[in-house]
Image (cartoon, grey):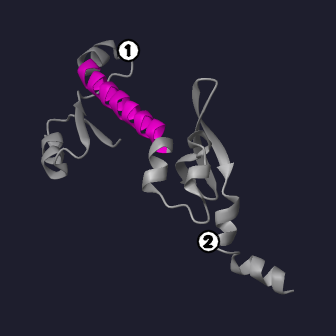
Amino acid sequence: MSAVILEDRGLSNDKFLLSFLRNRVHVHSLPQIPEDPLDDLTDWFSESSSVFNVLKDALQSFHLNRIERLNSMQRKSKDLLWWPFTQHNLVPQDSVTVIDSRCGENFSAYKIKDNKMMLVPQFDACASWWTQGPDSNLQAVFVA
């Protein structure tokens, strides 16, 4: 989920961003933070509570939609994906690995274990060799 949160200084930047982004990104404006360093910000947080509540609701909705999508992926995988060298009917649905994200050579695999949802880090061992091949430094080692 993307969001822009601005401190309102009377410039109406939130209205410009809302029209420019055409509601693709949440845009919220908070009251100006008091300049007095001794201010405990209680009044500021009270004035800002509606913005924080809208943002919290949007984050919760985004997260619930994401979990719902992840939970449906094992079921949908056989109809939507082609797995080379695989007899699809021989693969049990609960053995399908759902990959939530990737960073570098690692995946975050979505798993449900003991009724707990979790993201488990997994190393992308085969793709790094089969699809990208060794980098030029490693190729030099193989040649030597």
Q: Which residue is located at x 74 percent, y 78 percent?
A: 137
Q: Which residue is located at x 61 percent, y 71 percent?
A: 131
Q: Which residue is located at x 33 percent, y 22 percent?
A: 36
Residue 128 % position (x, y) = 66, 66
Residue 83 % position (x, y) = 55, 61
Which residue carries the number 1 mark? 40
Residue 122 % position (x, y) = 67, 48
Q: Nearer the viewer, mark 2 or mark 1?
A: 2
| SS category of the residue bearing label 2 | loop
Residue 98 % position (x, y) = 54, 45
Is 61 included in the stretch rendered in magenta? yes
Is tag 2's residue or tag 1's residue first in the polypeptide sequence?
Answer: 1
| SS category of the residue bearing label 1 | loop
In the image, 13 versus 134, the foreground residue is: 134
Q: Magenta segment range?
A: 49-73
Left or right: where 140 falls relative to 116: right
Q: Quadrant of residue 45?
A: top left
**What secondary structure predominates along the stretch shown in magenta?**
helix
Q: Residue furthest front?
A: 89
Q: Which residue is located at x 23 percent, y 27 percent?
A: 31
Is 122 included in the stretch rendered in magenta? no
Q: Quadrant of residue 44?
A: top left
